[in-house]
Structure formats: C-alpha cells, structure tokens
Amino acid sequence: MKDFIIEELEIIDAGAEGKAIGKWEGLTVFVPFAIPGDLVKVRVYKKKKKYAESYLLQIIKPSLDRVDAPCQHFGLCGGCKWQAMSYHKQLSYKQKQIEDNFARLGNFPFPPLMPIIKSEEEFYYRNKLEFTFTCRRWLDNTDMEQQKYGVIETRGVGFHIPGKFDKVLDIEHCYLQKDPSNAIRLAIKEYSLLHHLSFYNVREHEGLLRNVIIRTSSTHDLMVIMIFGEESEQINPLMDYLAERFPEITSLQFVINSKLNDTITDLNVNLFKGNPFIMEQMEDLQFKIGPTSFYQTNSQQAYNLYRIVRDLAKISADDIVYDLYTGTGTIANFVARFAKKVVGIEYVDAAIEDAKENSRLNHIDNTVFFAGDIAKVLTSEFIKQNDRPDIIITDPPRAGMHTKVIDQLLEILPQRIVYVSCNPATQARDITLLANHYEVKKVQPIDMFPHTQHVENIALLERK
C-alpha cells in the first residue's frame, strides 16, 4: 500500500498506546501526538480492513484542551505522549478508560468510579530512569540537512525511538526525574566524548558505554548504576569522575553486561562508592532498595496507592492477609501491623529476599514470604500450612492473574479481595471470573504516570 494523506481528520477520542483516534470513511485512524478536539492533517502509512496507522503532519485547528508541551523532544520521544493535553483532561480520559474496559470487557455490575486521584507532581515525578547510549543516535531533518555540509556527532544517550530498536533519541532535558538526573547524564556524555569512550553499537553488540540507571528517593539518597558492554581500563577513571563531580551520589555502582539483552538482574553489580542500596521511607517504615529492587516509580503516588489499599482491606488484628505478587513486600510490610499475619508470594527470588530484609529492617515479625510461580505455589496444601486468608491483596503484572490463581481464590473465598491493576482490561477479565461469588464495592483510579495513557486502578471485591 502506498502512503496517502487525509487532509482533514477530526480527533474524537484517546485510544490505546497513547494514540488519538479519528474516523475516516469507515476506518478508525490512529494518530500519535494528537489529542481529542484537534483537526489534523495526517499521512496514513498502514491501512487494514477496519483501522489505519498514521503520522501527524499538521494541526489545522487545535483542541481547546491542547497545551504547549514543555519538552523539546515531544513528538519524537515516545515517553510522554499526552504532554500536549491539559492534565485535567488526561485524568478524565484515564477515568473513562477504566469505565470503558469494565463496561465493555467485564460482565459484572460495578458502582460509579471514585474520582481519579491525581499526581501532585505533573513533572519530575519518577524516582527511576534508565538511559541508553548509542553510536547511532536518531537524526532528525535538521541533522540530516547539516550532515550535507560536514560530519555531525552521531553518538548520544537517551531513550529509544518507538519501534526502532537501534535508534536512540539524544536527550537534552527530561522532565520526568528531578535534578541532578539531567546533569549526571549530560556530564557522562561530555566526559565520554572528551575522552573518546566508545558508545554501544546494538547491531554489532560492541562498545563500552551501554546504559545508565539513576534512582532517587524521598530521603534524598541517590543511586547511579553504570552498565558497560565490556571490561575496560577506562571504567575506573569515569567512575572516579562521577564520584568527584557529584558528591551527592550515595550509591555508585557498575555492571559489565556483554549479553545480547539489557537485563542486569542475573549479573554481578559492583559497588564503587557508598552504600549498595538507597533508602525510601513511607510513614514510619523504611525500605531498602538495591540496584535491581522493584519500587513504584512515583514515590508519592505509591504511598497514596498503598494507603488506599490498606483502607479498603479493613484489616483487623485477627485477620490473615495474603499479598499476591508481593514484589519486594512493600504492601505486605505496609499493612502488617494491622494484621495477625501477612503471607507474601512473588516469583522473583531476589525480590523476596528484599521483602524479608525490609521486614527485618522495620522489626516486623508477622510476615512470611515465599518465592515461586504463584499458580504453582498457591495450593490447598500451602493454605493449610500458612492459614486460610481472610483478605487477599493482589497486584499482578499487566497480563493479569493466571486462571489457576483465580480458581484457587474461588476455593479460598476470602471475605475481601483488593485487586490492584495497571491494566484495567485484564482486571475486568479477571473480576468477571470472580463475579459469581464477589461484588465490586468500590473502584478507585489513581494516576501514577502523568502525560502517559497509563493508569492504576484499585477494585474492592466483597464476598456475596
């Protein structure tokens, strides 16, 4: 199919993956970086029977909800696709996303949704970012024009262009993480260019500089993890430079990753300076976060999320609570003081070790944690050994709960289930399977990621 242009397309809705939706001659047309209410000109590059994918060419008439995106990289970087939409309108579409999924994909009655809880910080709200080094950065039209008159710098560090595994957008300033995140990234780049360090070539799988992870915390701890693609004598001088240039770094670490993928959970993490962890605090609880530990990336909203989960669970001193997909046990430890016992299950061994450590750190002695596939761990024998739960809290990955886990919940029939989800579509599917025995009593959306289409949702289910 040849590309073709739609001269005028009215954007009527916000769709999946952060793309906007227009209708044209019976087709649903997806348009990135447009917002509902825009009248736009687009180039269609893929056409199927019922839908088409397009590029935004021109905004003919802007929506009343359109705002100026502060980020200079908006329109190329795929990280904040709703940045040109007013935050108030973003929240309304996130709430609508949950309502639509529950009504369309679910088969159960549910009450009116509670108003979505907004993020107090619209920008600089993330406590973790990972940047990628490249020897083949994305060249925009200006770069291509300048290249005609001489060689331009093709090395860079930033985020992958959506759909381009081998192209990285060189980032000047990112609005997602507070200072000194941008300063650290730019300093590494400047040092590396000056000292001729090689930037990673993902096609050839060679080069020194591969990734950098920056983690911050509400306690003002700062972790920097450099990921190198190979051993080199140039590593220590760079790490010394970072330690001297940024004395506020409390945990400076590095990893040698010569594998074909970017995962570092199976690799040794080398401590260069400071502590091998940073600390996070929630109420009077402290949480130790290692280089590969999971922690919700919006700290303030994580606290709001856990507080709501605790309130909805209505835990009493005699209750046995199971926390499924417990991760590093943050929710389990957060609710433990109100329960008789909390049992956490998670498939990642390292996460369970973190969960146990955080219980020890906070002198919590009524939690137990188990590592393994929840569909296999959560058996009748397991329940006999660990007591039948009165309350279950579940926070599965985007794919939702395995059907064997749901079957076991229907065997247990706890009084309450508090279901936390980052994907209201799979949440609606799972609740449907529980609906014969459970009634949805409350639905509470919460926005963890402003300027994106992602939304977190909490549903309280009570046994009929």
Image (spheres, rainbow, N blue to C red):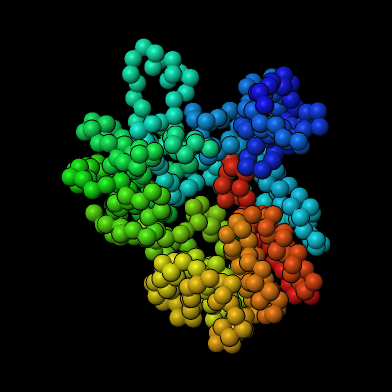
Q: Left or right of 419: which side holds 212?
A: left
Q: Residue 125, can we see it? A: yes
Q: Quadrant of residue 145?
A: top left
Q: Quadrant of the N terminus?
A: top right
Q: Left or right of 374: which side holds 409?
A: right
Q: Quadrant of residue 2?
A: top right
* Residue at the farthest front position: 1
Task: Tell me the residue at 17%/45% (across/down).
Answer: 233
Coordinates of residue 77 in the picture (x, y in percent):
51, 34
Coordinates of residue 14 in the picture (x, y in percent):
70, 39
Task: Tell me the residue at 75%/75% (across/down).
Answer: 463
Q: State the residue in front, 240 or 265.
A: 265
Q: Is residue 142 above or below residue 96?
A: above
Q: State the residue in front, 6 or 298.
A: 6
Q: Is residue 323 above or below residue 50?
A: below
Task: Tell me the residue at 48%/42% (across/down).
Answer: 176
Q: Left or right of 293: which side holds 317?
A: right
Task: Tell me the residue at 43%/46% (across/down).
Answer: 129
Q: Is residue 278 above or below residue 213?
A: below
Q: Quadrant of residue 451?
A: top right
Coordinates of residue 209 in the picture (x, y in percent):
31, 41
Q: Left or right of 233: which side holds 211?
A: right
Q: Is residue 74 above or below residue 336?
A: above
Q: Residue 61, can we see it? A: no
